[in-house]
Image: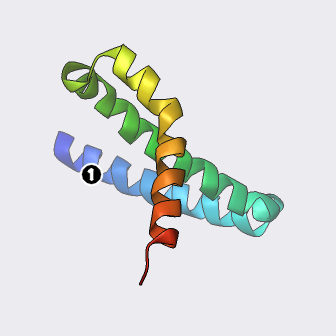
Amino acid sequence: MVLLWILGGTIVAGVGSVWIAALLSFGIMARLTKHMLSFAAGALLATALLQLLPEEEEESPPVRAVLLGHPLSPCVGTVLRKRELAAPH
């Protein structure tokens, strides 16, 4: 019996939330749909990437190497692009 109550509540909440979202999207919130979708996608990406941080700390190089490599990466990229453009084809 408890399982039926759980399933019924889940179905009612799911259908109700879809109806409420549809009413809001066609009414007042129609102008903000793109912004809300972008925010939701960003929140999902941020959550996924934040879950990777503890694993990255365990396997990361020393902080000094990261701090030195980060500012140098645009310089290295520019040099490699210039060498590619200067190379005879």
Quadrant of the rendering where the N terminus is positioned: top left
> Based on the displayed image, in which of its 4 quarters is residue 24 positioned?
bottom right
Residue 31 falls left or right of residue 85 = right
Q: Is residue 19 among the parts visible in the rendering?
A: yes
Residue 31, compared with residue 52, is above or below; it is below
| Number of callouts | 1
> Toward the viewer: 62 or 23?
62
Camera sees residue 1:
no
Image position, residue 60 (x, y; %): 25, 24
Label 1's element? Answer: helix
Q: How is the image coloured?
A: rainbow
Q: Amino acid at mark 1?
A: Leu
Image coords of residue 75 (percent x, y): 53, 43
Dot 1 corresponds to which residue? 7
Q: Nearer the viewer, residue 88 or 63?
A: 88
Q: Which residue is more in the foreground, 56 or 52? A: 56
Query: As displayed, is residue 58 above or below residue 70?
Result: above
